[in-house]
Image (cartoon, rainbow, N blue to C red):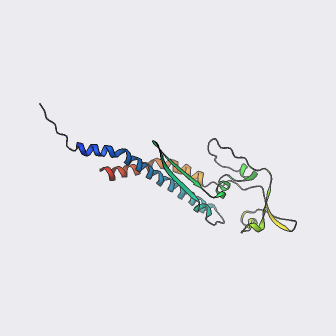
Amino acid sequence: MIECEIVGLNELKTKLRKLPQVVANATVNGQETAIEQAEAYAVQELQSSIKYSTGELARSFKHEVKVDGDEIVGRWWNSSMIAIFREFGTGKVGEQSSKQLPPNVAIVYRQTPWYIPAEEVEIDLTKIYGIPKVKIKDKYFYRTTGQPARQFMTPAANRIAKEAPGIIKKSVDQELRDKLGG
């Protein structure tokens, strides 16, 4: 009869019990890293394309990563009201401008011009964006038919969609080495 001794069986069982939680935590961390990178890409796009900025859009990113049963769900958004107008445009100009819409999303654009009271705007919209200023009953207004879409989140999301699997894999590999050993 041949006798066989398994060395390290208890250590293996301990590591196997820890494995699901280690992988889940690492995946959450990887998702968080991917979202932060998407935000960095969006900020980079904003900084390269904005003529006049208070930094509000760049400061208004929010995100969360949640574990929902067997799924890890990450959400990323911009809480500034301006973000959606910049991302998809406004009015006829926005409707006609080139943009990528999310699946199953249809946007309705205003078809008539509107007027922005000049006194409520801190910058000269004519000088910055070429929006004409008109005088109506002794008050000045900027008349606009909209602004083009100037997407900053969609390109960032598309870019990170390609990179996220590698980022998450790297996080999982690192956590497995750190928490369970070589």
Q: Is residue 7 visible?
A: yes
What residue occupies the far left of the structure in this picture? 1
**Could you tell me which residue is drawn at 68 percent across and 55 percent down?**
85
What residue occupies the far front of the structure in this picture? 69
**Could you tell me which residue is drawn at 75 percent across and 66 percent down?**
120
Q: What is the x, y in percent for residue 45?
A: 59, 58
In the displayed structure image, the side of residue 179 where residue 6 appears, left or right? left
What residue occupies the far right of the structure in this picture? 137
Number of numbered discs visible in the structure rendering: 0
Q: What is the x, y in percent for residue 81?
A: 66, 57
Q: Nearer the viewer, residue 141 or 8?
A: 8
Q: What is the x, y in percent for residue 117?
A: 78, 64
In the rendered image, the vertical position of residue 47 relative to residue 30, given as above or below: below
Q: Is residue 170 visible?
A: no
Q: Nearer the viewer, residue 9 or 42?
A: 9
In the displayed structure image, the side of residue 120 where residue 83 appears, left or right? left
**Could you tell me which residue is drawn at 65 percent across and 43 percent down?**
105
Which quarter of the figure has residue 14?
top left
Q: What is the x, y in percent for residue 28?
A: 45, 50
Q: Quadrant of the N terminus?
A: top left
In the rendered image, the vertical position of residue 128 relative to residue 98, given as above or below: below
Q: Nearer the viewer, residue 1 or 46?
A: 1
